[in-house]
Structures are given as structure tokens and as C-alpha cells.
Image (cartoon, rainbow, N blue to C red):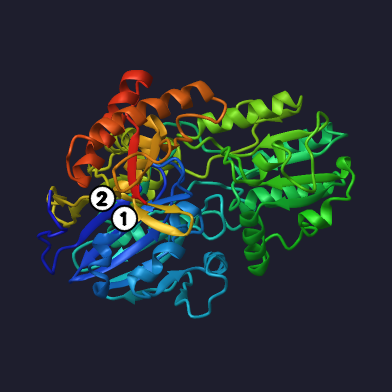
Amino acid sequence: MSNNFKVNIQKEDLIFLPLGGAGEIGMNCNLYHYLDKWLMIDLGVTFNDERVESADLVMPDITFMIERKSKLKGLICTHAHEDHIGAIPYLYDKLGNVPIFTTSFTASVLRRKFRNDHSLDIKILNYKEKFDIGPFNIEIIKLTHSIPEPNAVLIRTKHANIFHTGDWKLDENPLVGEAINEEKIKEIQKEGIHTMICDSTNVFNTEKSGSELDVRNCFKKIFKKKKTGKIIVTCFASNIARLETIGKIANEFDRTCVLLGRSLKRIYESAVENNYLCNLPKFLDEKEGRKIPDENIVLVCTGSQGEKRAALYKLVTDNNNNFLINKNDLVIFSSREIPGNEKKIISIKDLLLKKNCNYIDETSEKVHVSGHPSKSELKKMYEWVKPDTLVPVHGEFQHLKEHSEFAIKSGVKSSIIIENGDLLKIKKEKNETKIIDKIKTDRQVLIGNRVLPIGKKIFSNLRLINSEGYISVVLILNSKDDLVVNPIISAPSILSEEDKTDNDNIVIAIKKLSIEIINSGFDENVVNDEIRKKIKQFFKKNFGIKPITEVKLVRI
């Protein structure tokens, strides 16, 4: 592995380097190098890292690219999902105001994330146009997904042509946007596609992912049966096709849609700005909708993954000022479970059951369809594109391995599995595309308004405090080194105020060992260190833990 990002890349090398999204689902960030210039595709977030459970967002560590930002010619955003654009507001400044290239809807979403900062350098992409970003000749290709304007990126160079799919599926009835233009992709194939970088999320599914039309028909049956009470639908905020389905069916059954959650409101505004959802009655905000009778309302919420800060959790825990859930209501989980979120989702479903409130999810009804390609869809894309080499991304290692093996079985000449940090040198010649080096990759997390490397000691301290606890001891001494008062102890992660006996015993024990060490004649630094060690030993012996311990000597 290279140290300090010193990699042996030659000027002419065509390199693909994922910093996120290869070996995991989410947090997509992809780099391409050619003629000593770099191109970034997507810069997204994920929401889980067991090392820092308190993190608001998790994003890729892009130090490698920051060190080369003078050579970065552009950032292309394939679509507006958080796992593809969510890190841009937090990391963009570090990239030196590089131009962002994307289509109109994604640009609207981004501008709202930057609070409509007009200095943001966004260049709108149009279909059927070829343009250059540094040495890369680029064309975007319209695909289908669960959000408007999802795009593949065709990268042309003298060394090879690359088809970077982004997220996609095949949907003959996408309802929002157009179906994939098969003829256009077949035209590209005639140019010769050496490498296809392809979505692997849904590779274990053999059947078609399904159409949004299937979901719409299912919603119609559910709404028809539900005569009383509120209908509450929780879904991914950016799923505009789902919002249209909810709005259309709600209107058909004399219900008004009300949005709960800031991200939903921003996405809705961006959709309307780009002429999506315009044929539906307006979605209301909470204050506008709170007087509508339960049988005439649909609450559309964020929080399908059980997030405690999201609208659904606040609703279920009675922390919404405008609405309450009751036994007459129905909650529809119109989304899939993202791996790692299972416990949180089970927890929120348990809370619903305790309120005698029924819920429906995709295990019982077709209230969600995937936005990613199954095996049958992948095979069709291979046939259209005919790549020489398939590089699976956007999946955990099990997804990448399954996708790689399936591509070979389906007639693709070669497939290479790579993970975050692998430098893949792409060459037209058979069997010469290979991994030539590896850089260290990691994550950064958003805590409050700070973005910090996940390796920072503060996080290991947090994990230690969570498992072993924390204790602070203040010893007040006079000029003769006598304790003026009993040790002042703070250990909120170990003891509560009700534990009076334990508190008293700890004070007595710490007072005794402190006096012994203070009277030993050591200098103050040694005394401080010895007291800290003895306190840790005391807690290990009596409580079975070794808390982070701080000791402060105060002389009066």
C-alpha cells in the first residue's frame, strides 16, 4: 500500500479510483485520471458507522483528491440521491470551487442544499451533447431510477471508452421521466465500450425489479379499503415517482397530502421547479394540513429507516406538535430496508404496534419496488453495451463478487473486483486492465457542524466512554498538601445520583488512595498520574470497568 498517497501514476495512464461505494452500499465517490488531470463522479454520504453511532452523516475521506485539487477539472453528479450528492455541501469548499456538472433537477436540489448560493458553479448538462472536461470527452445518457434525471456517464478517451452507469433499473412505465432509450445505448456500443462501471445493489434478485406502476396499483387497493383514520406513508424523500403515486391516489380517494420532514419539502420544491408533480393538487405543509379530518389526509414522512431525528419517529413518539398517531391510522413503509438499519426499523414498528396502529411494508404488499437492476436487467444491459470488461461497484463485497461471476456467465469477456482505494489502470488491450496500486481510504463524519476524520482520537475516546465510562476527580489541597474537602467526583456515565451508597464508598476509597499517594513525596505530575492509575484499578476491581479518568489537583 502506498504511504501518504504517493502513487506511481504516469501522465498517460487512464485510472479508475473509487473512494467510496465499492465494497459498501452508499457513499459513492469515484475518480478518473487521464493526462495528469482528474474527474470526480458523485460525492455522497451514508448514514451508518458502528464506530461513531452519534454521527449525523458519514462521508468519504477525500484527502487524496484535496491534495491534487489543482488537477481536478470537474465533478459530475449522476443524480440527486443523498448517497451520490449528500457530501457536497460539507466537502465542496475543500475541492477549490471546482465546477459541478449535472442536469436541471439535481442542480435544483443541490442549490437548496447550499441555500441557493448563486456563487455555486453549476453547469447544466443536456442530453445528446458531447463536451470536454479537461482531457475527458463526456456525454450523459438518460436512464431510469427512482428519481428524475438519473444518468449514466460515457467517458471517451484515446485509451478507452468507459460507461459509468450510476444507479439505474429497467422500467417500461417509470411514470416520472422517460424509459431508457435502448437505441441510444446500442449506438454507443458501436463505438466500443472497453469498461463498464456498473451498479450491483440488486444483483441477488433474479426477477425484474418491478415498475412504479405496480406500486401505484397496490396503493390504489390499500386506499380503497381504508375508509377511516389517517394514512401515513414513509418513503425516501427523493423518490419523486413515489410522491406522484401518493399524490395521485390520495386525490382519487379525496385525501390531501401533507409533507413532514425538511428534506421532503426541499425535494418537492425542486420537483415543482422542474415541472414534475405539477398535475397534482399541492402538497401542504404541517400547519396548513393540521385541521384536515383524519379520513381526508395522507401524511408523507421521512424516516423509513427508523432514524430518530426524522419525521416518522417524532410522530410515533408523540413529538409532533400538529399530529398524533392513533389506532385508526395506517402506516405504509414504502421503501426497502438498507442493510444495517434493521434494528432501528424493527424498533419503530414495535412502537407502532404498542399504539395498536397497523402498518404495511414490502414483505406483505407491493408498496415498494427497487430502483436498481436485478440479474435479468443486468444481462440485458450487457447485451446492449457489450463491454469488454465489467467492474462492479455500489455494493458490499458479496454483491461485487456475485455481479462479477454473473457477468462472466452472461458472456462479458472479463470482470475485475475492486474496492475503495484500488487504482485500476484501464487499457484496451485484452487482460491488461488491472489493479496497479492501492491507497488508504477511510471515512469522515459530521458531528454537529464539524466534519472530522473517523480515525480521530476523540471517537476512540467516545467508544471507550460508551463501554467503560468516564470519571472526573477534583482534589482541593491546602499549602500543607492536606485535602480541604472530600474529593469532588463526577461520573454520570457510571453512577446516577440515586446510587448514594456506591457514591459514598467511591468518595471514601478515592480519598484514602489519594492521601497515600500525596504523602509519598512524589512531584505533582507523578502524584496526578499515580492517582489516576489507582482510580482505574479501583474501578476495575469493584465494577469490572476501566473508565477514562481525569484527575485535577487544585491548591488554595
Say which quarter of the image contains residue 128: bottom left
Q: Which residue is more in the foreground, 270 or 264?
A: 264
Q: Amino acid at mark 1?
A: Asp
Say which quarter of the image contains residue 397: top left
Q: Amino acid at mark 2?
A: Thr
Q: How many callouts does the rendering have?
A: 2
Residue projecting furthest to the bottom: 119
Mark 1 Cα shell of 10 Å, populated few (<14), some (14-19), many (≥20): many
Estimate the x, y position of residue 381 in percent, counting from the top left: 40, 47
Would you place residue 24 above or below residue 124 in this image?
Answer: above
- Provide the residue designation for mark 2: 441
Residue at left offset 46%, top offset 45%: 47
Q: Which residue is more in the foreground, 218 or 290?
A: 290
Nearest to N terminus: mark 2 or mark 1:
1
Say which quarter of the image contains residue 533: top left
Would you place residue 212 above or below residue 365 in this image?
Answer: below
**SS category of the residue bearing label 2:** loop
Would you place residue 10 above or below residue 340 in this image?
Answer: below
Left or right: 182 as drawn, with respect to 175: left
How far apart marks 2 and 1 lie (CA) works out to 7 Å
Estimate the x, y position of residue 442 in percent, counting from the top left: 29, 49
**SS category of the residue bearing label 1:** loop
Residue at left offset 36%, top offset 31%: 511
Q: Is residue 72 visible?
A: yes
Look at the numbered discs 2 and 1 and tell me whether their residues touch, using CB distance below 8 Å: yes
Estimate the x, y position of residue 165 in percent, counting from the top left: 39, 54
Left or right: 266 as drawn, with respect to 329: left
Estimate the x, y position of residue 99 in percent, counting from the top left: 39, 75
- Provide the residue designation for mark 1: 61
Residue at left offset 47%, top offset 76%: 120
Left or right: 285 as drawn, with respect to 201: right
Q: Is residue 217 visible?
A: no
